[in-house]
Image (tube, helix red, strand yellow):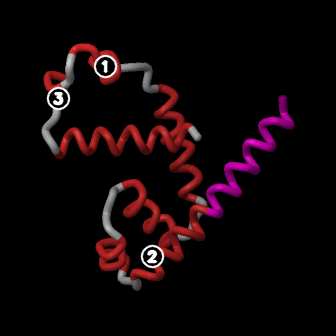
């Protein structure tokens, strides 16, 4: 699950950049929520996510990257990848299933090691 938090964090950062939001726009009682924190765990999560995505076929990886991480629409992704919109949806669905299985295997092997 840490990679999900990393994705959410990067999506929030992208949103803040697009809307030109800054810490100055945040009420003081919420300032600690947006202050810099130890980013090591999210960096490790991003590294793990990149390793997992690298195992996927290119069209599947790109579909997930563009739609789920970069926020492009299915139509934009289909145009970029030169495939149909339904193929993008299928690639995302299948890719996420493979990622879930990979994560389950890895977490199972980590539990066995401890």
Q: Is residue 99 above or below residue 34?
A: below
Q: Nearer the viewer, residue 51 or 103?
A: 103
Residue at the location (40% across, 54% down)?
69
Q: Residue 73 appears at what percent x and percent y? A: 32, 68
Q: Residue 97 appears at what percent x and percent y? A: 63, 63
Give the residues in magenta: 97-114
Q: Is disc 2 surrounded by few (<14), some (14 to 19) or many (20+) residues within 10 Å?
A: many
Dot 3 or dot 1, earlier in sequence: 3
Q: Quadrant of residue 38?
A: top left
Q: Quadrant of residue 110?
A: top right
Residue at the location (15% across, 26% down)?
25
Dot 2 or dot 1, earlier in sequence: 1
Q: Classify the position of the C terminus by image quarter.
A: top right
Residue 85 part of the magenta segment: no
Would you name the residue on which mark 1 appears? Answer: 35
Q: Secondary structure at mark 3?
A: loop
| Real-space CA distance between mark 3 and mark 2, rounded to the nearest whole angstrom | 34 Å
Would you name the residue on which mark 3 appears? Answer: 22
| Real-space CA distance between mark 3 and mark 1, rounded to the nearest whole angstrom | 11 Å
Q: Classify the position of the N terminus by image quarter.
A: top right
Would you name the residue on which mark 2 appears? Answer: 88
């Amino acid at each position: 699950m840490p990679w999900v938090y990393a994705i959410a964090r990067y999506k929030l950062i992208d949103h803040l950049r697009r809307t030109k939001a800054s810490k100055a726009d945040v009420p003081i009682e919420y300032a600690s929520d947006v202050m810099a924190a130890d980013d090591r765990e999210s960096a490790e999560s991003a590294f793990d996510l990149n390793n997992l995505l690298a195992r996927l076929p290119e069209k599947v990886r790109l579909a997930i990257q563009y739609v789920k991480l970069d926020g492009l629409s299915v139509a934009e992704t289909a145009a970029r990848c030169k495939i149909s919109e339904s193929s993008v949806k299928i690639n995302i669905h299948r890719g996420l299933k493979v990622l879930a299985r990979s994560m389950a295997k890895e977490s199972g092997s980590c539990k066995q090691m401890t």
